[in-house]
Amino acid sequence: KSVADLGDLRGKRVLVRCDLNVPLDGETITDDGRIRASVPTLTQLREAGARVVVMAHLARPKGQVNPKYSLAPAAKRLGELLGTDVVLAQDVVGPSAEAMVAGLADGEIGMLENVRYEPAEESKVDAERVELAQRYAAFGDVFVSDGFGVVHRKQASVYDVASLLPNAAGGLVLAEVEVLKRLTESPERPYVVVLGGAKVSDKLAVIANLLGTADTVVVGGGMLFTFLAAQGHEVGTSLLERDQIDTVRGYLEQAEATGKRIVLPTDIVVAPEFKADATPTVVAADAMPADQLGLDIGPESAKAFADVVRGAKTVFWNGPMGVAEWAAFANGTRAVAQALTEVDGLSVVGGGDSAAAVRDLGFADDDFGHISTGGGASLEYLEGKTLPGLAVLG
Ligand code: 3PG
């Protein structure tokens, strides 16, 4: 169901889950893509005369109130983009939130504080989440799911609340699903998936399933070191998921047995410490020094990755190849991004960090077929998994 199916919304309180999880440098938003992507649905609701209550999370405060993770910068930026005040409650379901919701007039918009301040938001215990979701549901007459980036999370503000109110998918969620459907139902081949980024354990888990549909999986970013370790190589002080090494060895064997390709870097940019101005050195991927850490793929690998991408008819890319926000370690990400812009077919960039990286490197959104607001969410969709936040709608 779409927003139009919810009927006349004038005077109704519409609870909307958005994904406003934007990268911050202190209180400065370094990429507001997810906030901009949320504007059309919120505008549609305001123009319909709804009283709009936005729910969102920022980062992973793990159930603790922490001003570092306040949604204040996001509320301010959203207000600028909408050309109106977005009142931010001081709490999630407390007296400030109640007063904020009660004070909304038709067409006005307010926001709850970071829903992940509430320990029950991400609880694995259904009853705990449902109890919190009931408190959210008391703030709305209907629920709109528009935070595509979070629909893979079975969390109170994404999943449980949806079953307590009449609900619909917002335009952003519908548009994202439309594009990703093209990748799952008959992608033009070769179909290449490029994986990188820092949320390593989340992403390692998707590879087995992706190997079923994609022809080639290219691995860079934080997870590549677990692959190198699985091949028996030294990875120095790089990011490493030690307990995943055997699993990763299994992926390499699975690829070999099924004729799929996992492409790994052959050279790495290492540095003695995790710092923007640390001295970079290029080394062979099978000869990393024990006292250094990898911060990007090397130039030979960047070229090889770019060639694989350019030869594809369908490409999905999630996760920077290195620490792309630092100039000395951005070359791998830049090369892959450039190659994506040259694909003769459908190129999709997914995830907050990847989208931020390509914009930061000077690429425009329309250089790519589609920039998805969802990283983990789009990967799980492509794996063919049921996403709780989508399954619950309807
Ligand atoms: C994201 O950044 O991918 C989404 O906002 C979800 O965040 P999470 O991985 O912390 O659940």
Image (cartoon, helix red, strand yellow):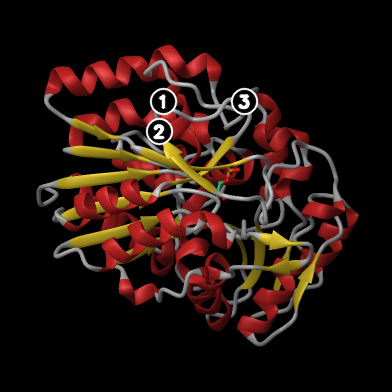
Picture coordinates of residue 379, whole percent (x, y): 37, 42
Picture coordinates of residue 291, whole percent (x, y): 63, 29
What residue lies at 78% left-to-right and 44% top-to-bottom?
117
Q: Secondary structure at mark 1?
A: helix
Tell whether label 2 touches label 1 (CB within 8 Å).
yes
Identify the residue at the far bottom of this view: 83
Read off the residue under disc 1: 228
Q: Earlier in the sequence, mark 2 or mark 3?
A: 3
Q: Nearer the viewer, mark 2 or mark 3?
A: 2
Quadrant of image for the N terminus: bottom left
Relative vertical location of residue 204 with respect to residue 334 in this rendering, above or below: above
What residue lies at 61% left-to-right and 29% top-to-bottom?
237
For label 1, count other residues whose C-alpha is less than 10 Å away and answer few (under 14), some (14-19) or many (20+).
many
Three-letter amino acid code at the position of disc 3: Asp
Give the quarter of the image for residue 297. top left
Three-letter amino acid code at the position of disc 1: Leu
Read off the residue under disc 3: 126
What residue lies at 62% left-to-right and 82% top-to-bottom?
82
